[in-house]
Amino acid sequence: MRQEAGEFHFSPRPNRAAEINWRPWSAGAFEEAKLTARPILLSISAVWCHWCHVMDETTYSHAGIIDLINREYVPIRVDNDVRPDINQRYNMGGWPSTAFLTSSGDILTGATYMPPDQMADALSKVAGYYRTNQPEIATRVLEARKRSGSAVARSAGSLDEGLVDSILEAATTAYDPQYGGFGNAPKFPQTDAILLLLEQSQLRSDPELRQMAVHTLEQMAGGGTYDHVGGGFFRYSTTQDWSVPHFEKMLEDHTGLVSSLALAGMETVLDSTAGYLDRVLRDPKTGMYAGSQDADEHYYSMDAEERAQRPAPYVDRRVYTSWNAALAIGYLDAAVRLDRPALRKHAGKLLESLFRNAYRRDEGMAHAEGVGGQLSDQVWSLWATLRAHEAGLGGQWMEAALDLAAHIEERYADPQAGGYFDHAGGDDLGRLADRIKPLVENSIAAMALVELDILAGDPTAPHLARARVALESVAGLPRQYGLMAAVFARALDRTHHAIKVTTANPELARAAVLAHPYVVIDPAGDRRALVCVGTICLAPVSTPVAVVEALKEASATRA
């Protein structure tokens, strides 16, 4: 049984970590640090994190360390999944993250996993330094704040169309022709890079790009990174050949994998993956999906019969809005592309429950139960409402989309420079006062806004203009990020090449989706299909073949 102390989660194995007087991230904890003149020990953990569990069982179970922390520090524990905004600013290079802070939340030093001897030494040295070097610490803090002050300005840039080519080149250069994937080890799925390859292959009529993506997915699914007994993908591989994984399974990772498998047409692996998600992570009552399942190397080394005799690894049943919305998008896309009506049904129930629990008109989406929303929750939910509308799940989704778009603009936008900050303010403790415009979330916002602009049909194109501004606000980052900016390339390309198809005919809608990766389906109209680029519409067509030809003609017009 997993040990818990209030809101804190610790290793499922025996440990004494709960004997540390952990505080939640709160104004009270920071105030206590100031009043007692103690430094803050910030531990960023995660329910699914193997080395976080090890640190609970070793370092945080050591009697001397427990006593030292409780005597000399104000210890704060944060779950990465619950507070990604804190992790964004304080992660020390992985999980667990161990950060030593001033009472104002500025970083003194830090590391990831720290064994007992190293931790005991660090705790003593930092506490002593903090007591005797306040003037020097104050000077260092001021200098660090000056250096970080222009970070938002440095992230902005112009929308050079060559960025799509350069990011695509970064992906193909990093591609591993033997084992698939990108780079050496460790290897992560990099699903946005896979999706970029698949989309550009179709747009450029370049089968080699598609082969790179498919080979990558096949190698992952055929190797140790895939659970061949229970289905689903492990988080990443520690080896270049995908043979030795980190065994946690994350809903976040599966959202991009579902979309990739659908676009690649890999039906068998997609069905097995969705089977795992629906059987293990899905709550049959609400239709919503749990956040993760723990790593357990011994359990996953067993065959099916042996597994059946043991309890499965712990599942974190918390529902995270952004990940559920992203999964709904993947399921709706797979439902159309691969003719999977069950996935459409699951996506519909998921979104109904998610919005019933997390959405408030004019207030946007919460992140999880009792946790305020962040930009990721708003933009993924916006895109999901549009996909629900396109799938014909009801007119209420367009109404919700327009409300969410207005909320994002009101609460998250930078009124001076444009683009969107990762959280709406309200919690400015420590580094949360530093404004960040994240590349991924601004790119997702742009993709959603492009589709909203096409569906809303406003001739002034306000949503398209906002999409371009969002991308401009982070356009200085892609050349540094390389293939990690694949999501930006996908978004930028959509601002130029998205096409609208209006049809109430599912067969014609499917033909359109299969023919062009940026098709936006308007479910209005009749049984024919009307293909439009901007204000130019072609003659209505009535067969799948004619839809494909019309899309080719429309694409040539746009080019």
Image: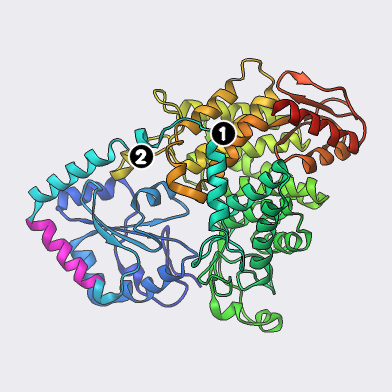
The segment highlighted magenta reads 119-132
Mark 1 belongs to which amino acid? Ala
Please state the horizontal and vertical placement of residue 91, each as a whole percent of the image: 36, 55
Q: Can the viewer see residue 378 in this picture?
A: no
Tell me, yes or no, whether the highlighted magenta stretch contains residue 124.
Answer: yes
Q: Can the viewer see residue 98 in this picture?
A: yes
Quarter of the image with the C terminus is top right
- Judging depth in this view, the residue of 211 and 143 nearest the camera is 211
Label ID, residue 427: 2
In this rendering, position of residue 120 left or right of residue 3: left
Residue at 65% from the left image edge and 28% from the top image edge: 452
Q: Which residue position is annotated with label 1?
A: 446
Count the labels in the image: 2
- Whichever of callouts 2 and 1 sits on the residue coming sooner in the sequence is 2
In the picture, residue 264 is in which quadrant?
bottom right
Tell me, yes or no, whether the highlighted magenta stretch contains residue 331.
Answer: no
Mark 2 belongs to which amino acid? Asp
Label 1: element kind: helix
